Image (cartoon, rainbow, N blue to C red):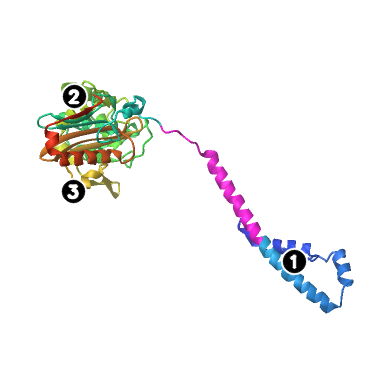
Amino acid sequence: MKNIYSLLPRIALCAALAAAGFSAHAQGTDTAPSKTAAAKSSAKKPSEGRNASASTTVRKAKSSAQGTEKSAVKAVRGARNGRKLAAAGAGATIVAAKPTYGQLYGLHSVEDPLALKSSVALVLDQDTNEVLFSKNSSAVLPIASITKLMTALVVVDAGQSMDEKLTITDEDIDSEKGTHSRLVVGTTLTRGEMMHLALMASENRAANAMGRHYPGGLNAFVAAMNQKAQSLGMKDTHYVEPTGLNSHNQSSAKDLAALVKVAHEVPLLRELSTSREYQVALGHRQVQFHSTNGLLSNPGWDIGLQKTGFINEAGRCLVMQARMAGRKLIMVFLDSTGKYSRIGDAERVRKWITSNQFEINHAKTKVGD
């Protein structure tokens, strides 16, 4: 392409001169005037006139050449851009957004007084179990990385050492959704560090590694997850793996509220899930991880435990324990549409509770249940 641009001025000038009956040096080649041009030149006025005429023609030719050069440059650039667009378009595929289970079930058609974007929501008093707000709270949906709360709880129940070193292997690579991880194969961290990253940054490989290192392996771990769910009365809940990437990990808002309540009783889970950032050594580098829940950085919130989740089938999910309006509350939001909608829903509930404390103490809001 560089050689083409270097030749454009000469090519354009030659084209213009040829049109006027002149020739020019191009690429070091000499060309004689055409017979027609010579005849016309000798039939005209004296040499000064011919020189003046020739000079005028050359100026016009140069001007025309400049215009031709600009047009040629635009043509070359247009062709080059066209090829780029064609190449990009050849590999581009328009994929329709995959509906969530909640959308398929028609749960978003249920209206609520707070106009929440989550098709499922539940707010209850942690101490009294009084339900303050409920929307489709019995619906059973995929729960994505909310799963990791149960993963961590089972590890804690097993009494496994938080200092034991665990290594990421090929078995921890996500074959379900193809998600990326900074924990490359061969990464070795303590179980405590793995749990920290799983709860705070929702690290899938860390969660899976904890499951693999359970006595009896991954299958025994998943069985323990389901047994724990049953012991907590979580009848709508079923797990098939420890990360939440599989859409068959499902539960209801009522069941998840019970899980949050029990998990909040474990100091380690409270501490790790509400951590805003954490740095670990990966090889020779210190790598910073951050929480997936932006509300932890909001001074208006007093959060005691939390976990976020997202896969296409589940939408945006969020569970929390938080203090507000003199109460300890448990909040569950499932199948929220929009990247920040679960955070927006939590804020709407907080404002509703803090602004209507008296009314909330004497009334409950239930829709779709």
Residue at point 87% right, 64% down?
36
Residue 201 seen in the figure: no
Q: Which residues are magenta?
A: 69-97
Q: CA distance from mark 2 to mark 1?
A: 89 Å
Q: Tell me the amino acid under the disc marked 3.
A: Pro
Near-viewer residue (302 or 225): 302
- Side (left or right) of 148 relative to 10: left
Nearer the observer, disc 3 or disc 2? 3
Residue at point 23% right, 46% down?
278
- Asked whether disc 1 touches disc 3, contact meaning CB atoms under 8 Å apart, the reply is no
How many neighbours does mark 3 have within 10 angstroms: few (below 14), some (14-19), or many (20 or more)? Answer: few
Write down the residue under mark 2: 228
Q: How many marks?
A: 3
Q: Which mark is residue 198?
A: none
Was residue 248 drawn as part of the magenta stretch in this picture?
no
How many neighbours does mark 2 have within 10 angstroms: few (below 14), some (14-19), or many (20 or more)? Answer: some
Was residue 70 drawn as part of the magenta stretch in this picture?
yes
Report helix, strand or loop for mark 2: helix
Q: CA distance from mark 1 to mark 3?
A: 76 Å
Residue 33 position in % (x across, y down) = 83, 66
Write down the residue under mark 1: 25
Q: Quadrant of residue 148?
A: top left
- Asked whether disc 3 touches disc 2, contact meaning CB atoms under 8 Å apart, the reply is no
Report helix, strand or loop for mark 1: loop
Report helix, strand or loop for mark 3: loop
Residue 271 position in % (x across, y down) = 16, 41
Write down the residue under mark 3: 299
Near-viewer residue (354 or 66): 354
- From the viewer's perspective, is residue 51 above or below residue 210? below
Residue 128 position in % (x across, y down) = 10, 30
Q: Tell me the amino acid under the disc marked 1.
A: His
